[in-house]
Image: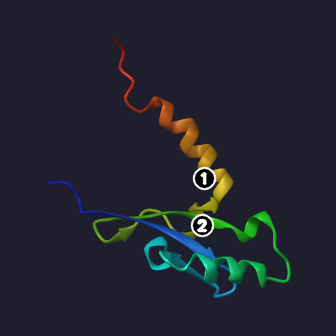
Amino acid sequence: MAAPLKITFKVYLEAQERWTPATELLGRAESVVDSYLRLNHLTCCSFQGGFFIDIDGKPWSDESTVDEFHELAKRLDRGLPQLGKTDA
């Protein structure tokens, strides 16, 4: 039997110093943008997010395995062309 799998996309909100599930940010775009604009030092590292994966209740990935959004997009882009390919 396959282990239970839980995948949550989280965004790091530097102003609040916490990882927040993206579902909690729905409908709050204005306050999220304001929180970034209030930062004293805004850099690309201020924009971090990624997939937090738990397998059978144990973390497989965590805040040390996520990165800036632009890096995540590059990794997904490199991997996505391989999906659905066959050796036909």
Residue 55 appears left or right of 41: left
Residue 14 appears left or right of 25: right
Residue 81: x, y in percent? 50, 31
Q: In the drawing, what numbered circle is on residue 72?
A: 1
- Under circle 1, the secondary element is helix
Q: Which residue is mark 2?
A: 64
Residue found at x 46% / y 30%: 82
Residue found at x 36% / y 15%: 87
- Is 74 in front, or is 54? 74
Q: Amino acid at mark 2?
A: Ser
Q: Amino acid at mark 1?
A: Leu
Q: Dividing the picture into quarters, in which one does residue 75 lie?
A: top right
Seen as rendered, the residue at the extreme bottom is 16
Label 2 or label 1, whichever comes before in sequence order: 2
Q: CA distance from mark 2 to mark 1?
A: 13 Å
Residue found at x 58% / y 75%: 29
Q: Residues within 10 Å of mark 1 (few under 14, many from 20)?
A: some
Q: In the drawing, what numbered circle is on residue 23?
A: none
Figure check: 14 above or below 10: below
Figure check: 71 above or below 19: above
